[in-house]
Amino acid sequence: MKVNTLLTPLNADELYFTKKNTVVIDVLRATTTIVTALQNGAKEIIPVGSVEFAMQVSGNAFSGHTLLGGERNTLKIDGFALGNSPLEYVPNIVKGKSIVLFTTNGSKAIVKARFSTNLFILSFFKCSSSGTKNY
């Protein structure tokens, strides 16, 4: 087995990931936010590579069933409903919604690796036996 490690996908071409199994690990926030949103009932997460594309994709096409979430350089983006903290993605906000997510690193890495044979995300999310979440 051969394992390649990229600390950032920024210098890799999208086709680099073709016919590869890829695991995206964004330790600080993106993957934990994605897992939390899905666990709390979000319909889907749509990672995007730019703020402009996030706004274009969300539009009004989904009749209020889409939320914009994410951050740019650690700050919540003006006009976005949610930032990048897993604590914001609670059931009464995300249940049944599609979430278009842009983050400075995590969503870009996921988008870059989209041509992988298998694409996984890894989170250090932990759920205690009492059902409370630990971040």
Image (cartoon, rainbow, N blue to C red):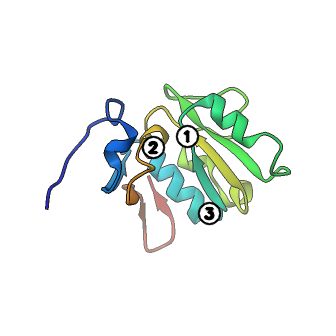
Q: 125 left or right of 78?
A: left
Q: Is residue 66 above or below residue 128?
A: above
Residue at numbered disc 1: 84
Q: Is residue 86 above or below residue 36?
A: above
Secondary structure type for disc 1: loop
Q: Residues within 10 Å of mark 1 (few under 14, many from 20)?
A: many
Q: 65 left or right of 10?
A: right
Q: CA distance from mark 3 to mark 2?
A: 16 Å
Q: Which of the marked residues, 3 or 1, is nearer the chain's N terminus? A: 3
Give the amino acid type for the residue marked by disc 2 in the picture: Arg
Residue at numbered disc 3: 40
Give the amino acid type for the residue marked by disc 3 in the picture: Asn
The residue depicted at 52 percent of the width and 50 percent of the height is 33
Q: Which of the marked residues, 3 or 2, is nearer the chain's N terminus? A: 2
Asked whether disc 2 touches disc 1, contact meaning CB atoms under 8 Å apart, the reply is: yes
Q: 3 left or right of 39?
A: left
